[in-house]
Each structure stands twice: as C-alpha cells, then as structure tokens.
Image: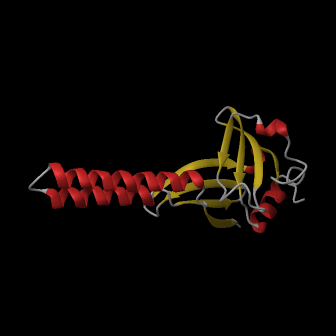
Amino acid sequence: MDIFIEKIVQKRKDMKDYLIIVGIALAALILMLLVLNYIPGMTFIFIIVIGYVGYLLITSRNIEYEYAVTNGDLDIDKIIAQRKRKRIFSANCKEFEIVAKLKSSHYSNHYKSYKNQLNCASSLDNENVYFAVLNYNKEQTVLYFEPSERMLNNFKTFIPRKVFND
C-alpha cells in the first residue's frame, strides 16, 4: 500500500521581502509620474501596464512550499503567488545522513559550513524546523524544512537510526 502525505508551508516575509516590496512600489510610482509628465497620449495604458507589472512583482514575494512524501520519497515544490510551481528538491529519505530538529544538539557548526543550503521552511526561527543532510546533486547539502509528524514517522520506517525528534 502506497503512503502519500502532503503539507503546505507558507514562507514568512522577512525584512528583505518588505524592503523589496517598498522598492517596487516606489519605482512604480516614480515611473507613473514620469509617464504622466513626459509621455502624452497613451498615458493611461502605460500607467495600467506599470501598475500591473508592479502588482505581479509584489505578489511574487508570496511563496509557499509543498512537501509531498510518497513511500519515503520527499518532493518539495516552490509555489510563487499561487501562479507558478517549480520542483526544487526531490530525494529518497534513504539518502539522508541525519534528520533532526534545527534547535537540537544534533545541529552543529559543521553543517552550517556546507556551501549548499536549501531553505524550504517558513522561517528558521520556527520551533518545528528540521534539517536533513544528504549528498544532493553531488554536493553535501543541508535541507531545512517543516515536516509533519506523519512524515517523520514515514521516514523512521525507512531510516530509524537517522531520524531524531528531540
């Protein structure tokens, strides 16, 4: 019997996201003012186009991650503004060296030094963030994600000595 577990996590906006949003809004307003002053005739169309492009850029900061576990295979998709979906991670849990809570004794400075870090969590400050270490695309990788209890139990059936809940 196949086991399929799904979870969607919305990325929390940080200061960088808010600065980008403010920058886009200010740039759109400045462009609209320039169009009003220097391009007579089709001003209305240009203003609508600038506003729409600004709207698309601002809403592209709304990011969700969808985790799907099927018989030990973890797939993570990045969903941007509920318009665009892209697979950003796919691996079997048997490839994981360790799965543990980020705020535990298992997470050491050794893992922080890995060049390839894949953050698929709402925020790294969250209590429910786990990390997994594996060789992904021929590089040592640390994956940050927020699995459900059912996902962790599914991983435990395949790799019982590598999953830690403490």
Location of residue 133 in the rendering, given as x and y in whole percent from the top left corner: 77, 43
Label count reads 0
Viewer-nearest residue: 85 or 41? 41
Residue 103 lies left or right of residue 29; in this view the side is right
Relative to 115, is 101 above or below?
Answer: below
- Name the outermost residue toward the left: 41
Colouring: secondary structure
Q: Which part of the image, by quadrant, shows the N terminus?
A: bottom right
User: Who's the residue at 59% across and 54% down the image?
Assistant: 15
Relative to 17, is 136 above or below?
Answer: above
Viewer-nearest residue: 36 or 122? 36
Residue 99 lies left or right of residue 14; in this view the side is right
Location of residue 100 in the rendering, given as x and y in whole percent from the top left corner: 83, 53
Location of residue 13 in the rendering, given as x and y in whole percent from the top left corner: 58, 59
- Name the outermost residue toward the front: 37
Location of residue 75 in the rendering, given as x and y in whole percent from the top left corner: 62, 54
User: Who's the residue at 83% across and 59% down the image?
Assistant: 157
Viewer-nearest residue: 57 or 76? 57
Q: Which part of the image, by quadrant, shows the C terminus?
A: bottom right
Viewer-nearest residue: 50 or 100? 50
User: Who's the residue at 20% across and 52% down the image?
Assistant: 35
